[in-house]
Amino acid sequence: MQSNGKTMRLGAMTASAILLMLAVCIVPVSADNDVFTDNNQTYAAVSNNAGARFDIFGNDTYYFNFTKPTGGLNAIHITDSPSSLNGAVYTGQSASGTLYISDTSTDTQYHDDVILLFAVPAEASYSNLNLLVNASGYQWAPTGDGSKPVLDGGYYHDLTLSETFVSADFRPGTSAWRPAPLDDYPIYYGQDMGVNEQFKIMLIDLYTGSVNQTGLVDSGTVKVDYCLTGYDEGVAYFDAYAWNNQSAQAQGISWTNRIIGTGSSGWAISI
């Protein structure tokens, strides 16, 4: 009987040890339905058929690398005209139109590539959605030392991207926020982050860069013509990101349009 009791005690101790080991080994992970694993120092894939223009990691992803607590929110803007580089918050926009992504950076004065974020509310009827995006702007081979490229008319392209995106191009999951140097950064201006409004999101590589140089075509902005069909009612939003091969912030996406407070810019479609 003593031997049997000892065996039972050993069995109980072994079971407890196994449970403890399992508890120690389990680490927190992001929810399965999250679009992004984090707001910063994270990777995300673009939805283009041809993948990322600068496919550094071989899987069509870009690395979000905001190196300053509130940095990267003053250089990239969304505007309705290349003559208004600081942009504004544009609401009630039609299902087809033209926007520009401008560059007012004073450190780099350029960005090698620009990525467009497109979002619709998760509860919207988007299964038949078609988003045609035509982009134009300057393309160049990134400079190895991070210096501003010297550009002329030969670097300008009337069409760097012409592609139709569909509902299957949305990234898996939903999100109430987007990558930025701050936690819980909104999708659109005035978004109440306490409501937990969820969105379907896709990232679109525009295959062109932005330059802070007014003497260039469209003042060095990226021109985006879009046409949204198959999405009969509701709202949709555009935000912008910029990537550099080499800068003081290192390689990655380190800039986006500000959407909180003074200096905000954004594009909201209402149908």
Image: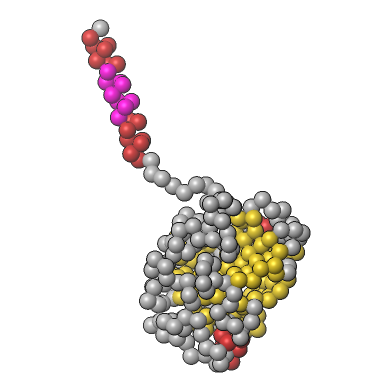
**Position in image of residue 126 (x %, y %):** 70, 56
Quadrant position of residue 87: bottom right
State whether residue 81 is above or below residue 127: below
**Position in image of residue 127 (x %, y %):** 71, 54
Residue 131 visible in the displayed image? no
Residue 14: in magenta span: yes
State whether residue 161 is above or below residue 170: below
Quadrant position of residue 4: top left
Q: Nearer the viewer, residue 32 or 231?
A: 231
Q: Quadrant of the N terminus?
A: top left
| Identity of the residue drawn at 44% across and 76% down | 245
Magenta residues (range): 9-17
Residue lying farthest to the top in this orientation: 1
Residue lying farthest to the left in this orientation: 2
Residue 55: in magenta span: no
| Identity of the residue drawn at 24% across and 15% down | 6
Q: Main secondary structure of the magenta part?
A: helix
Q: Quadrant of the C terminus?
A: bottom right
Figure colour scheme: secondary structure
| Identity of the residue drawn at 38% across and 41% down | 26
State whether residue 141 is above or below residue 97: below
Q: Left of 61 or right of it: where is 125?
A: right
| Identity of the residue drawn at 61% across and 77% down | 79
**Position in image of residue 98 (x %, y %):** 68, 76
Residue 179 visible in the displayed image? yes
- How many labels sit on residues? 0
**Position in image of residue 170 (x %, y %):** 62, 58
Q: Left of 104 or right of it: where is 223?
A: right
Q: Nearer the viewer, residue 139 or 88?
A: 88
